[in-house]
Amino acid sequence: GPVLFAAAQWLARAIPTWHEKLRLMDGTPLRCAASRVTVDRSGLGGIAGYGRGKSHHAFYWGAKLLLITTAEGAVTAFCLAHPKELDERKQALHLLHVQRCAPGPCAVVCDK
């Protein structure tokens, strides 16, 4: 929530690499359930869904965790996205513009 985001922002701004013009971005599947019973009982229905983990070649039920970090690995922005409904590139643009993950224009290195 907002408190976790504020704490991550404060920590990222406290290290010297906050002012560098380079950010790293990646997304990873966040598995939330392994059985149909758990999926049915879960309160994450609005965020989580079925997706395909490309690196593990398997389907999962959960969300996609998107992170933007400094070169040292300090998290400057993050979000959870539905694995099918939200385009990862659009979500990344949202993170870059709305969450103000850098002090100004910067280069973002990612795998897509």
Image (cartoon, rainbow, N blue to C red):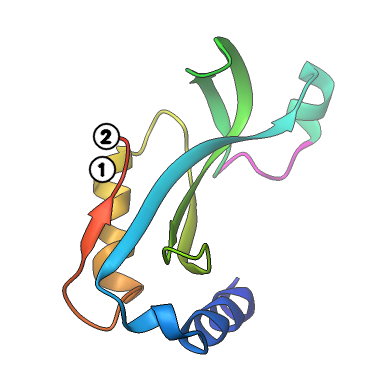
Q: Quadrant of residue 32?
A: top right
Residue drawn 37% across and 55% down?
24
- The residue lying toward the viewer, choosing from 109 and 77, is 109
Up the image or down, 5 lies above or below 88; here it is below
Q: Quadrant of the C terminus?
A: top left
Type of residue at label 1? Arg
Circle nearer the viewer, 1 or 2: 2
Q: Give the residue pinned by disc 1.
A: 89
Q: Which residues are magenta?
A: 42-46
Main structural element of the magenta stretch: helix, strand or loop?
Answer: loop
Q: Quadrant of the N terminus?
A: bottom right
Up the image or down, 109 lies above or below 52; here it is below
Q: Give the residue pinned by disc 2.
A: 112
State if disc 2 and disc 1 touch (CB < 8 Å).
yes
Residue drawn 25% across and 56% down?
108
Kindly state the secondary structure of the residue where label 2 is placed.
Answer: loop
Residue drawn 30% across and 52% down?
92
Using residue 40 as the reference point, say whether residue 90 is left or right of it: left
User: Where does the image place residue 14, in percent across and percent down from the top left?
Assistant: 52, 89
